Image (tube, grey):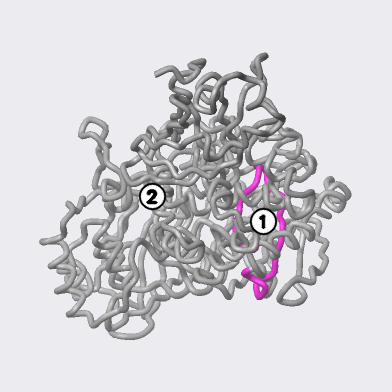
Amino acid sequence: MVVENRCFKESSKGWFSAKSRPFIGMVLALVMAVNFAPFQVYAQGDGQRYFQRSDASQPSYTRADSLRGGVTPERAWWDLTHYHLQVAVDIEARALSGVNRMQYRVRESLDEQTERLMQVSGVDAADVILASNTGRLQIDLQAPMQLVSALQQGRSLEVEQEGSAWFISGVDTGLGLHAIDLVFEGQPLVAANPPWDGGITWQEDSAGRPFVASANQGIGASIWWPNKDHPWDEPDSMRISVRLPDSLMNVSNGRLLQVEQHGDGTHTTHWGVVNPINNYGVNINIAAYEHFSEVFYGLNGPLSVDYYVLPENLEAARRQFAEVPRTLEAFEYWFGAYPFYEDGFKIVEVPYLGMEHQSSVTYGNGYANGYRGRDLSGSGWGMEFDFIIVHEVAHEWFANSLTNEDVADMWIHESFTNYAESLFLEYHFGWQAAQEYVRGLRFAVSHDRPVIPDYGVNERGSGDMYYRGSNFLHTLRAIVSDDTLWRAVLLGLNQEFFQQTVGTEALVDYMSEVVGFDVAPLAKQYLMEARLPVLEYGFRGGQLRYRYAQVGADFAMPVDVTVGILSDEGSDSEVFSELRLVPTTRWQSLDLSEVMDLGMAGLALLVAYDESDFLNYKRWNLRVEPDFYVGALEVNPGEKGVD
């Protein structure tokens, strides 16, 4: 998702992996886990497992939060496989009506991911069995939209509403595939500030023609159509059929399969998606579009690239969208082949800034470089590319292919995608450009609250998931200090979790395996705490003394520093040493005589003291290498080593 300018407010497979097992075995295992687990399971989410809050700061969640963000019993027992969303758009009334035919599968056993997320949500396995036995499932649709009815094989099913959750009873529960028709209608929420405060945008182009679009990452796709609105379970494919006036065109995800004429002044566009797709990435975009296209020859062969823009912006689009092929080229280098060759790629002009709709990226950045004409990093490099194109295209890998299993893990989308902006610069402009850009983004970090909040309650973390998150990744790369290995990490993530939903632990475990050290304590510090690590240091008795502050007890991150002698004028001299320290929370010391070449420039011969006196007499300086995102504090500034 794009960064919001006003305050940057934003807020799979998970922390474990195991084989699926028979359903009865799952029941026993989960009952035991609920009763005897060494940590408390919170019905409203268990973020406390990963970082501790004081009781006073513990948020208060409601049942509505659990229904929205948890893997409830009525969600757990069935596996979503396909949507056919059929919607008629009444532009004058600002209303939608239609049917979502939802296909689902019933298996003999639940998969490991579902079992684990049930536990995170505080769900008892016995309740899942009860929901399955009674054929009770949960669908989500937010007011003022209404679920009119639910039908299965001609039968009208019982429907109960609890807020945005709709419980349907009496559905088929036999092993295999089944389908339900979800009939809906209403006037969906008008987007107040899309894409952040989402809904449907109803505007007009310069000629007074309708210009309509959906955008709903934060608020959820259930703001305008009924679905299983939780990120962990995606349909394997989808069809989107939109009926609208003949004077307009609808553009949605995937490929255009058919335009069906009705002979009454309306037509239906049928779009098909053959890959898994997240709910929030499903979109409709309606305007009197002009269309042009090209072919990108990438790692998997020819990729169709289509553009849909307003007529008045056609020439500007032809110029600005020359950015697209070189963006795809850069990200195929870093992340591997574009994940959705079968569905093509398109950019669609919309009446808001833009968003990462899968294979249907939306654009409203004014056909100019930067973020609404400015450089978010302040380095100057942000004006070398169109922010919306680069940022949203990167989301095709991190968000649309590799998707968070809980919105609490949205850093997986935004941290990697924000970091991808610097990778784009590195590919086309060099390493220095990338460094300056990502470091410049640190001015936007607020350190207000953790990037990863509580799980199971649809809670999003701090907007620092963008800039603190990208600098966490930049720091990891500095620790690895091997560009080939670091690229292997990025490529490997997109192979290991290709078109899957994933949680933080599984992702961090994989990174640890590839880089050869435990990334978890670092991820915990940068993503689950608000404070930045601080390297405290001082010079005394011919030694450098150092430790970390504002970190967890298990934090022991390597950091590269330069230690040198200050001249009499207070500036750096030519006598220095580059070191890699591994501080912990305990004070450590390093003998300066072991790391400094005191004979350099003849300095040791200029004083009538022995080496020990010389080390104490001189003033010293330490500088943290800037690719490491840590603070630095000299605890005894100006002291010349006097005990």
- The picture quadrant where one finds residue 139 is bottom left
Q: Is residue 353 magenta?
A: yes
Q: Examine the rendering and report whether any part of residue 93 can be seen.
A: no
Point out residue 173 in the picture as x, y percentages from the top left corner: 27, 79
Point out residue 523 in the picture as x, y percentages from the top left corner: 43, 49
Q: Examine the rendering and report whether any part of residue 74 can be seen.
A: yes
Q: Identify the residue position indicated by label 1 in the image.
A: 393
Classify mark 1: residues with Cα within 10 Å, few (<14), some (14-19) or many (20+). Answer: many
Foreground of the two, 432 or 324: 432
Q: Identify the residue position indicated by label 2 in the image.
A: 521
> Could you tell me which residue is drawn at 28 percent across and 72 percent down?
77
- The picture quadrant where one finds residue 335 is bottom right
Distance between mark 2 and mark 1 Cα atoms: 30 Å
Which residue range is magenta in the image? 339-359
Describe residue 108's horizontal placement relative to residue 643 as left or right: left
> Could you tell me which residue is drawn at 51 percent across and 34 percent down?
592
